[in-house]
Image: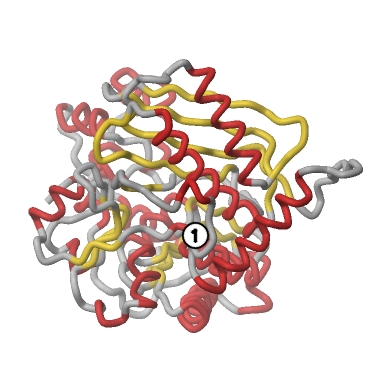
């Protein structure tokens, strides 16, 4: 069993929750999120090993059902290895626009409970529910309410960790997957933490774990018993102090509410290295279209546009430009990334991966935009809105640029 599987394997379903007094921090984690969303439209696949990811030779697993995980398949694994481990797995291509839509709806459920929602990713978030206790009841009752609303409204399940700190709440949610709830009483944090492997502590990567194992420190209890000064001599002042605090359940970080993504982007890894600028620009167009759709559906505009170019030897070049005015137009995004690609001077350099990202986001409704007589972008803005409406009604790709009508290169698209 891999290190990652040891930390995230489903724990036993807990019985009645313990005392949740003072446990106002919740970590909500959707169960096999991408797969769960796919099963909404493919119910016949329920109970089967399902993998979401790129099917090409360089494809990577984005998500795996619990049935597939039973064969050792997990996210970030090369698809070729996943197929060897589980030959009968059904492989589905990712549909990040659909996942983003469901994610936004789930986050709205969270914000209907409390404004203090801190998303960590598309499928997980921290909530501080102190302000909702009088209105909705105890933390465990609020956790049950969240699970019920997500299930009823979106048809998917989530697991909730309830604790007094963010760190412990996140660990608790891994212990009740899938579709469970786990309460770590404020007075029981040490009993919960100390039997766990040291790798459970945030900040312990594989190299740090090797160092701790060399020192004979295999559990959180082992680490907690080491004097702070000795830990700092072995790991450095900052990491030593950090792990010492976590080992005793101390994590003062508050839940920091955020209302929007920090950036929106898309990447593609080619099945084979590409050095044809025409194919690369066509891929940049497809990614720009995808990013533009996500910006507009989320109600965002962005000022900083970047292109990511990874070469065959894995060296990666990133170039960005900040616009005078924010945009949500795919046309503007594409024109900018093409200019950045040209400036990078990689015209005939074989590329393994390309990516497009928009950062420095703001609300489209709240961002003033200067209008000029006969403004050329007005027609494009209306055209892209019509394309969005068609895609919403008839599916992604129902209307698209002519340059994208024919594609000869297979690929694996992943968004990060």
Instruction: Reply above or below: 74 against 137.
Output: above
**Whole-percent x and y of residue 415?**
43, 47
Q: Residues within 10 Å of mark 1 (few under 14, many from 20)?
A: some
**Residue 368 figure quarter:** top right
**Whole-percent x and y of residue 35?**
33, 66
Q: How many marks?
A: 1
Q: Is residue 399 left or right of residue 243?
A: right
Colour scheme employed for the rendering of this structure: secondary structure
Residue labelled with disc 1: 97
**Whole-percent x and y of residue 36?**
36, 70
Residue depicted at 35% across the width and 53% down the height: 190
Residue depicted at 58% across the width and 54% down the height: 293
**Residue 12 figure quarter:** bottom left
Instruction: Reply above or below: 143 against 246.
Output: below
**Whole-percent x and y of residue 207?**
24, 28
Q: Is residue 324 left or right of residue 234?
A: right
Residue depicted at 31% across the width and 46% down the height: 408
On-image quarter of the C terminus: top left
**Residue 34 figure quarter:** bottom left
Query: In front: 287, or 214?
Result: 287
Look at the numbered disc 1 and give the secondary structure of its residue.
Answer: helix
Examine the rendering and report whether any part of residue 195 can be seen: no
Instruction: Reply above or below: 395 against 165.
Output: below
Q: Is residue 359 left or right of residue 369?
A: left
Residue depicted at 45% across the width and 59% down the height: 123
Examine the rendering and report whether any part of residue 266 can be seen: yes
Query: In front: 300, or 5?
Result: 300
């Amino acid at each position: 069993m891999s290190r990652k599987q040891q930390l995230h394997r489903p724990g036993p379903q807990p019985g009645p929750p313990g005392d949740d007094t003072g446990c106002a921090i919740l970590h909500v984690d959707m169960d096999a999120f991408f797969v769960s969303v796919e099963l909404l439209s493919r119910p016949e696949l329920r109970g089967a090993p399902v993998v979401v990811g790129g099917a090409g030779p360089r494809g990577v697993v984005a998500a795996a059902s619990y049935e597939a995980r039973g064969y050792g398949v997990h996210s970030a694994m090369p698809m070729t290895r996943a197929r060897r481990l589980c030959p009968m797995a059904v492989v589905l291509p990712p549909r990040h626009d659909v996942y983003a839509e469901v994610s936004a709806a789930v986050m709205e459920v969270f914000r209907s409970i409390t404004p203090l929602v801190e998303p960590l990713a598309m499928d997980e978030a921290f909530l501080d529910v102190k302000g909702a206790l009088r209105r909705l009841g105890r933390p465990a009752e609020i956790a049950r309410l969240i699970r019920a609303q997500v299930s009823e409204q979106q048809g998917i399940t989530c697991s909730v960790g309830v604790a007094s700190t963010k760190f412990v709440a996140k660990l608790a949610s891994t212990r009740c997957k899938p579709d469970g709830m786990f309460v770590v009483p404020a007075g029981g944090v040490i009993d919960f933490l100390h039997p766990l492997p040291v790798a459970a502590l945030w900040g312990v990567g594989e190299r740090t774990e090797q160092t701790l194992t060399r020192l004979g420190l295999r559990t959180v209890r082992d680490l907690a018993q080491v004097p702070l000064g000795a830990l700092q001599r072995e790991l450095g002042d900052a990491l030593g102090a950090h792990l010492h605090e976590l080992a005793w359940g101390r994590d003062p970080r508050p839940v920091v509410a955020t209302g929007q993504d920090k950036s929106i982007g898309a990447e593609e890894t080619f099945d084979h290295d590409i050095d044809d600028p025409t194919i690369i620009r066509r891929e940049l167009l497809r990614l720009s279209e995808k990013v533009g759709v996500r910006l507009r559906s989320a109600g965002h505009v962005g000022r900083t546009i970047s292109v990511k170019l990874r070469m065959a030897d894995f060296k990666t070049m990133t170039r960005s430009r900040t616009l005078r005015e924010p945009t949500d137009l795919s046309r503007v995004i594409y024109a900018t990334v093409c200019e950045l690609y040209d400036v990078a001077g990689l015209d005939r350099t074989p590329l393994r991966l390309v990516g497009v990202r928009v950062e420095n986001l703001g609300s489209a409704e709240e961002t003033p935009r200067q209008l000029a007589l006969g403004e050329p972008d007005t027609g494009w803005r209306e055209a892209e809105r019509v394309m969005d409406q068609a895609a919403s009604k008839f599916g992604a790709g129902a209307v698209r640029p002519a340059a994208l009508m024919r594609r000869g290169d297979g690929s694996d698209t992943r968004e990060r």
